[in-house]
Image: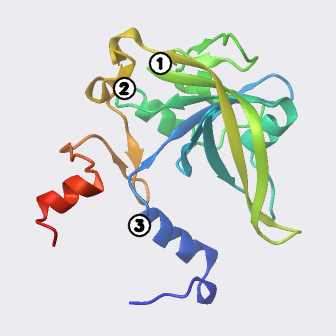
Amino acid sequence: MIIDPKQQSKKDNYKLLIGSVLPRPIAFVTSLGPNGTLNAAPFSFFNVVGTQPPLLAFSCIRKPGGVMKDTARNILEHGEFVVHVVDGNNVAMVNDTSIDFPPEESEAEAVGFTPVPSEAVKVPGLKEAKIRMECRLYRHFVLGGTDEEPDCDHLIGEVVLFHIDDALCDGGRIDTVALDPVGRLAGTTYVRLGEMFSMPRLSYGEWREKTNGA
C-alpha cells in the first residue's frame, strides 16, 4: 500500500503517524498561565535533540483555526517550563490532565499532583514525578499549515537542572526498571516496559571479522 499524504486529510495523516512512530516518550510539561495558574499537559511528540547543552524538544499541535495551545503560549510568554517523565505511578493522573479544564483552574492540582518549587526557574515542578527537568526556552519554531493557520509550535528547551529520585541513580545512569517509564501508542493506548535486550555496536573491523568478510 502506498499513501500520498497530500491526498488525504490531516486527521488521516495523524492516525498513520501515531500508529507508526511508537512507542513515543511523553513530556509532561508544567508552565505558568497569565494569572500564575500552574498549567500541566502531556505531549507525545517529544524527544532529546541535543546534549551540549542538554536539549529537549516537543511539539504542540495547534487547535482548530491555528489557535496556540496554553502550554506553548505560556512558555513563549515566560520562557520557562518543567518537563516530567511519565511513569507507571503517575500515568493515570497525567491522563486526567488531558481533560478540558477551564484556564483559571490548575489541571495538575485538580487531579492530585503536588506542586513543588523549582530552583532555577519560576515554574513549579510536580512531586510525584521520579524525574523532572527544569528548562528555559532555547528555540521556538512555527511549523506546517499556512501563514494564517499554522499546524504546530515546536519548542526546544535547555535543561538547566535535573531532579532525579535517588533510588534511580547508579553511577550516573538511570535504572530503567525502577523508573517504569510509560509511552504512548496509537489512540488512547499506553505502553510500559516489555522485553528488553542489548546488542553490541561493533566496529567495522569487528563486523567484517564476525561476518567472515561477506
Tell me residue 24's x, y (percent).
Answer: 44, 50
**Which residue is pictured at 24% across the width and 55% down the height?**
205
Residue denoted by label 2: 89
Q: Quadrant of the C terminus?
A: bottom left
Residue 2 falls in which quadrant of the image?
Answer: bottom left
Q: Residue at x 66, y 13 (%)?
A: 118
SS type, badge 1: loop
Q: Residue at x 71, y 45 (%)?
A: 155
Helix, strand or loop at label 3? It is: helix
Which of the labelled discs sits on residue 20, or is there none?
3
Disc 2 vs disc 3: Cβ atoms closer than 8 Å? no
The numbered mark, 3 or 1, whose residue comes first in the sequence reads: 3
- Of mark 2 and mark 3, the one earlier in the sequence is 3
Q: What residue is drawn where x is 88% and y is 69%?
A: 147
Label 3 amino acid? Ser
Residues tagged 2 and 1 counted as in contact (Cβ below 8 A): yes
The answer to whether residue 3 is above or below residue 38 is below
Relative to 28, 172 lies left or right: left
Above or below, 168 relative to 137: above
Return the x and y of residue 162 as percentages of the image width and height. Answer: 56, 19
Image quadrant in which you'd find residue 64: bottom right
* Of the two numbered discs 3 and 1 in the rendering, the one whose residue sits closer to the viewer: 3
Q: Nearer the viewer, residue 160 or 108?
A: 160
Please provide percent x and percent y for residue 119: 68, 10
Q: Residues within 10 Å of mark 3 (few under 14, many from 20)?
A: few
In the image shown, does 126 or 23 lie closer to the viewer?
Answer: 23
Q: Element type at marker 2?
A: loop
CA–CA distance in space, label 3 to label 1: 30 Å
Q: Which residue is mark 1?
A: 128
The quadrant of the picture occupied by the N terminus is: bottom left
Q: Are marks 3 and 1 in contact (CB under 8 Å)?
A: no
Q: Is residue 212 left or right of residue 120?
A: left
